[in-house]
Image (cartoon, helix red, strand yellow):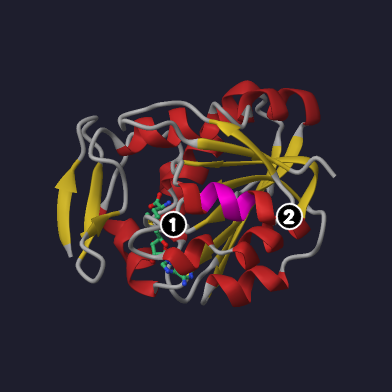
Amino acid sequence: MEKIQTRDGSETFVNPKFNESYHSFTGAVEEATEKYCKPTKIAEIARERGEFTLLDFAFGMGYNSAMAIAIAKEANPDCKINVIGIENDPLIIEKIQEVNPKIPGYEFYKQLTPKNLCIKSEDNSITLKILLGDAKDTIQTIQSNTVDVVFYDSFSPKTQPEMWSIFLFQEVHRVLKQKGILATYSCARLVRDNIKAAGLTYADGPKVGRRGPGTIVWKEN
Ligand SMILES: C[S@@+](CC[C@H](N)C(=O)[O-])C[C@H]1O[C@@H](n2cnc3c(N)ncnc32)[C@H](O)[C@@H]1O
């Protein structure tokens, strides 16, 4: 797999099967912060609730949830964070050893290997479990109404339309708590139509490094 450097200096890879990169060329760490953590108000959740469960959908090398942990811990060092990762490719989990993004605390993720998919911080305040397998199967193992925030970072809907299906958004609806929130980089028509068909509400997310905005999604009821 070809390793490349994004514009903020963080490294990513290009997936040879889909010919698509794991992160935006404009900056992988910037993307994690601006497209995922800020619009879902991770810092506020950490300060106000003191605990949350984050579903990192399409986990890859985990930049987005790693940044959420860093931001949450900066806002509230006592915050308890439970991360569930969804990923089907053990090879990308191995690649975590080959990258060093400027994300405080990313070393924690270096404990992850295809054989060690469940890790805890020393003080037990952070737990992370990767559900390895096809998203449409593994998401069904998550309990209903247990997730506060979803980061939805699949390859593009043009490349992998099946990862943006009504069924998957219905599953997101099922696992989200009421008023739970999702962020994704995509604003594609297909994505938004499927989000709506699954009973979720959406609005424009921030414009970062791309022409179009992202999408922010809520579970109203
Ligand atoms: C754009 S990348 C995600 C990048 C990731 N968020 C990160 O920070 O490194 C999309 C990810 O979806 C995963 N994926 C593709 N098809 C999948 C499937 N059917 N089930 C679960 N994961 C899948 C890919 O292996 C890839 O790691």
Instruction: Provide the residue span drawn in magenta.
Output: 191-195
Is 211 placed left or right of 166 in the picture?
left
Is residue 125 at all visible to an observer of this figure?
no
Is 6 placed left or right of 122 in the picture?
left
Q: Is residue 110 above or below residue 135?
A: above
| Mark 1 element type | loop
Q: CA distance from mark 1 to mark 2?
A: 17 Å
Is 180 placed left or right of 159 in the picture?
right
Which comes before the other along the chain, label 1 or label 2?
1
| Mark 2 element type | helix
Residue at x 43%, y 73% (from the top left corner): 114
Is residue 179 at all visible to an observer of this figure?
yes
Residue 6: image location, x then y, percent: 21, 38
User: Which secondary structure is most common in the magenta stretch?
Assistant: helix
Q: Is mark 1 within 8 Å of ligand 1?
A: yes
Residue 38: image location, x then y, percent: 54, 26
Q: In what quadrant does ligand 1 lie? A: bottom left
Residue at x 43%, y 37% (from the top left corner): 32
Magenta span has 216? Answer: no
The residue identified by callout 1 is 154
**Other residues around mark 2 within 10 Å, as few (<14) / some (14–19) / many (≥20):** many
The residue identified by callout 2 is 173
The disc placed on residue 83 is none
